[in-house]
Image: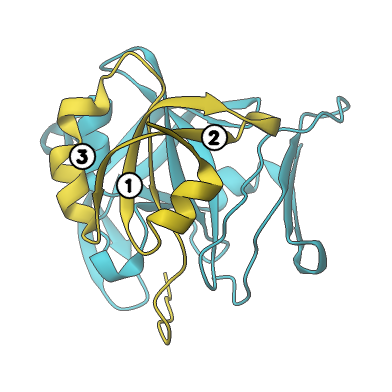
Amino acid sequence: MLGNTLKGLACCYNGNQRKNGAIWKWAIYSCSVILVQLWSVAENKYKDISLTLDTGASVTTLTPEIFYALGYEPSSMPKKKLTTASDVTIVSHFSLDAIKIGNIELKNIDAYALKFPEESFSMGVIGLNVLRQFDVELLFSQHIVRLIKL
Amino acid sequence: MYKTIEQIHQEYDGQWVFLINCTEGEHHSIAGGEVVLSSERRDKVLREMNQFWTHDSRTYILYAGKYPEGVSVLL
């Protein structure tokens, strides 16, 4: 988990097209929150949501309410064991049709339904299963998170 | 009423907000929108957002402002 405030510009670059993607203008306290778009199977379009960028998470997780809103049925999904910093829990495992960060689309992303406490100020995290598809630069001096697609 | 994202962060500091009629800003960011739900309780917004979630326009849910003083989060 990032220990310093990141606030301001975040850019997505797509390979050789050095083209700016998303900006995350507001970071909350000691974590960076990024704007992503999740594919809604219910509406056949992308939905905007802010998720926490978490380099300490191996997987991507979303609070169950968001999965429902996207048209997924947690009860019908396979269950997997998920280990967090404080607990081991059983959660529903999904394959998100697509996630879009800036202008970069990633398909068939593994994700888990995990209820976050209200006090976490989060609805989910983008984990390493997504982040490792990029080179990730955390430029604290410039308040920038930069993702460069591999 | 449309507000910029900066206005929303200032006016709704410490609250979860749900926006409709969002506009895109620079680099695919959300530049602003119309606040239709707001609450200090995230789950209240998540419960009530269903009526707006499938709105024709672009929607967005976010926590506005900063963490309360003295709060640290480990995820």
The single residue placed furthest to the front in the displayed view is B1
Q: CA distance from mark 2 to mark 3?
A: 34 Å
Question: Tag 3: Cα neighbours inside 10 Å, few (<14), some, or many (≥20)?
Answer: few
On the image, the x and y values in percent for residue A131 come to: 61, 48
- Please report, as a chain letter, where disc 1 is located: B
**Left or right: A64 as drawn, with respect to B68:** left
> Can residue A15 be spotted in the picture?
yes
Q: CA distance from mark 2 to mark 1?
A: 13 Å
The label on residue A78 is: 3
Viewer-side label of 1, 3:
1
Amino acid carrying label 3: it is Pro
Picture residue at 43% right of the left edge, 72% below the top? B67
Amino acid carrying label 1: it is Val
Q: Circle 2 sits on which residue?
A: B30
What colour has chain A?
Answer: cyan
- Looking at the rendering, which quadrant does residue B54 occupy? top left
**Left or right: A25 as drawn, with respect to A99:** right
Amino acid carrying label 2: it is Ile
Instruction: Locate the C terminus of chain B by quadrant.
Output: bottom left
In the rendered structure, which disc, 2 or 1, sits on the residue that comes first in sequence? 1
Q: CA distance from mark 1 to mark 3?
A: 32 Å
Picture residue at 23% right of the left edge, 31% below the top? A69
